Image (tube, helix red, strand yellow):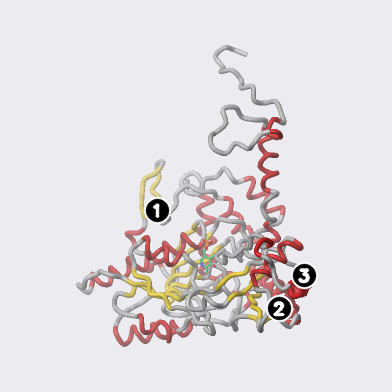
């Protein structure tokens, strides 16, 4: 060794971590062997739940070995370096065109790859705010106090947008017997300061859709009556990848005149690992030019419309892989498998006799149910019991206002819950009811951490 080199740290002997606390407040002075670092982390992760048994999440928890290899081989490719990686940028554009086509866009369109639906919604809502301001300025009217209308069945990101970007949220509260919104709820909130209306296709609470057809009709009539051209944004985080395959005749997308933008989470039913989302505009005119940043970066002129900058390319490539690997017929088949297993689980759960399903109509592949009648136990006890017995992660939660008194449980039925496991879950739920009925409910001290978040 030459003396130009610094001294090699004496940290490469193995196994010290076995008898020590994990470093948790400062970067340790000495490192450890790579195998040790990996083992330390892997052992801790075993305390987390197994993602494939997570029936609370909409997000993809399984992908096949070929696409995992593709992902692993492209972790070092920064997506935003369009000048260096023009083919990656081209593949992003192909995905945008494919989705615009899937959503029945009438003309040449534009869109963006995002980190998920949250970023897509922020960008889509910003576009609505900018377009509204342009309309107001063209009419020589003031552009103060913009508002945005949506139901209590939306994801938290919509309220976040309103707070971060200074827009008044006009939220239609849910009711115990009405878990989605329609034109009758929206109409009273519309005025000339409304930048847009957001409708959900596939809510996180019960998997149903707002009445997009009805709201579109209302907005068309409003345009004729008042001259306000109010755009409709469809939050299809989950549904935009499900409806085209399970409910192709149901209109929720650009077939409807006022639908100007749609977001979809590639990492939900697009069947890609997190984080990838998509924002698709109806046409190029829906994206205000001054939200796009042009810059000369590394020698080339580049256009970006994002909140983030550097990020991986792997999930964009994985999305494209899924599109060409499955094709439309493959996606349709996979969605139908999930739906069939959903039906089987729903039937099994209803056969127990203690439950009722929530909501009605076209739905994501999930079952949402609640207890009916009087019981010495509740949905949260059942969730704890299922977790204790076999590690099932089935969330129990309350609905948002004004349906907050409704407690329910929900299980996603994705490809990681095949028929055999769906049956097993139904059996375990039946047994949980019996055990809890005998015990007279669950004691506070027995309650394990129950997954109560419904938002992902
Ligand atoms: C998941 C979800 C979001 C947020 O999406 P991310 O991709 O997690 O950012 C927004 N809206 C709905 C309806 C969702 O289901």
Ligand 1 within 8 A of label 2's CB?
A: no
The residue where tag 2 is placed is: 346
Assign the N terminus to one quadrant of the image: top right
Q: Position of residue 168 (x, y in %)?
A: 34, 70
Quadrant of the rendered image containing residue 5: top right
- Do labels 3 and 1 touch, CB within 8 Å? no
Nearest the camera: 383 or 374?
A: 374
Nearest the camera: 448 or 60?
A: 448
Q: Position of 438 compared to 377: left or right?
A: right
Q: Disc 3 on helix, strand or loop? A: helix
- Do labels 2 and 1 touch, CB within 8 Å? no
Vertical side of 181 occupied by 29: above or below: above
- Residue extending farthest top: 3
Q: Position of residue 99 (x, y in %)?
A: 53, 67
Vertical side of 45 occupied by 233: above or below: below
Tell me if I can see residue 394 in this picture: yes
The residue where tag 1 is placed is: 303
Q: Position of residue 124 (x, y in %)?
A: 42, 65
In the rendered structure, find residue 144 and report the number of the disc placed on it.
none
Sequence-earlier tag: 3 or 1:
1
Tell me if I can see residue 330 in this picture: no
How dense is the environment of label 1, judged by Cα within 10 Å: few (below 14), some, or many (20 and up)? few
Nearest the camera: 190 or 171?
A: 171
Q: Disc 2 on helix, strand or loop? A: helix
Q: CA distance from mark 3 to mark 1?
A: 53 Å
Vertical side of 7 occupied by 28: above or below: below
Sequence-earlier tag: 3 or 2:
2
- Residue extending farthest left: 140
Q: Position of 365 compared to 4: left or right?
A: right
Sequence-earlier tag: 2 or 1:
1
The residue where tag 3 is placed is: 428
Q: Nearer the viewer, mark 3 or mark 1?
A: 3
């Amino acid at each position: 060794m030459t003396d130009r080199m610094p001294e090699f740290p004496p940290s490469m002997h193995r196994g010290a971590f076995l008898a020590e606390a994990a470093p948790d407040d400062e970067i340790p002075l000495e490192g450890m062997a790579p195998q040790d670092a990996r083992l330390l982390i892997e052992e801790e992760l075993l305390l987390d739940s197994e993602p494939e048994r997570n029936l609370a999440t909409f997000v993809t928890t399984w992908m096949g070995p070929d696409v995992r290899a593709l992902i692993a081989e492209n972790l070092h490719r920064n997506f935003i370096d369009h000048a260096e990686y023009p083919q990656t940028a081209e593949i992003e554009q192909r995905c945008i065109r494919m989705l615009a086509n899937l959503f029945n866009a009438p003309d040449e369109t534009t869109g963006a790859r995002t980190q998920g639906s949250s970023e897509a919604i922020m960008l889509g809502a910003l576009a609505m705010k900018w377009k509204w301001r342009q309309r107001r300025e063209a009419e020589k009217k003031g552009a103060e106090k913009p508002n945005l209308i949506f139901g209590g069945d939306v994801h938290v990101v919509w309220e976040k947008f309103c707070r971060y970007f200074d827009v008044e949220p006009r939220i239609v509260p849910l009711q115990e017997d009405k878990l989605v919104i329609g034109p009758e709820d929206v109409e009273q909130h519309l005025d000339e300061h409304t930048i847009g209306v957001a409708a959900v296709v596939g809510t996180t609470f019960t998997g149903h859709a707002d009445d997009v057809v009805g709201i579109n009709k209302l907005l068309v009539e409003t345009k004729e009556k008042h001259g306000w051209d109010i755009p409709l944004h469809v939050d299809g985080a989950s549904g935009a990848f499900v409806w085209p395959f399970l409910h192709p005749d149901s209109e929720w997308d650009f077939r409807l005149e006022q639908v100007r933008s749609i977001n979809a989470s590639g990492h939900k039913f697009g069947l890609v690992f997190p984080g990838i989302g998509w924002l698709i505009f109806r046409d190029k005119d829906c994206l205000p030019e001054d939200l796009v940043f042009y810059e000369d970066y590394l020698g080339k002129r580049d256009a970006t419309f994002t909140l983030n900058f550097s990020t991986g390319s792997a999930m964009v490539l994985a999305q494209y892989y899924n599109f060409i690997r499955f094709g439309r017929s493959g996606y349709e088949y996979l969605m139908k498998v999930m739906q069939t297993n959903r039906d089987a689980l729903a039937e099994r759960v209803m056969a127990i006799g203690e439950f009722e399903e929530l909501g009605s109509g076209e739905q994501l592949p999930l079952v949402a149910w609640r207890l009916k009648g009087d019981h010495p136990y509740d949905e949260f006890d059942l969730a704890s019991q299922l977790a204790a017995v076999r590690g099932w992660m089935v969330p129990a939660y309350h609905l948002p206002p004004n349906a907050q008194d409704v407690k329910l449980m929900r299980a996603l039925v994705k490809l990681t819950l095949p028929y055999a496991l769906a049956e097993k879950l139904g059996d375990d739920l039946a047994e949980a009811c019996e055990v809890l009925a005998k015990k007279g409910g669950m004691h506070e001290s027995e309650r394990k951490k129950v997954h109560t978040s419904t938002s992902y």
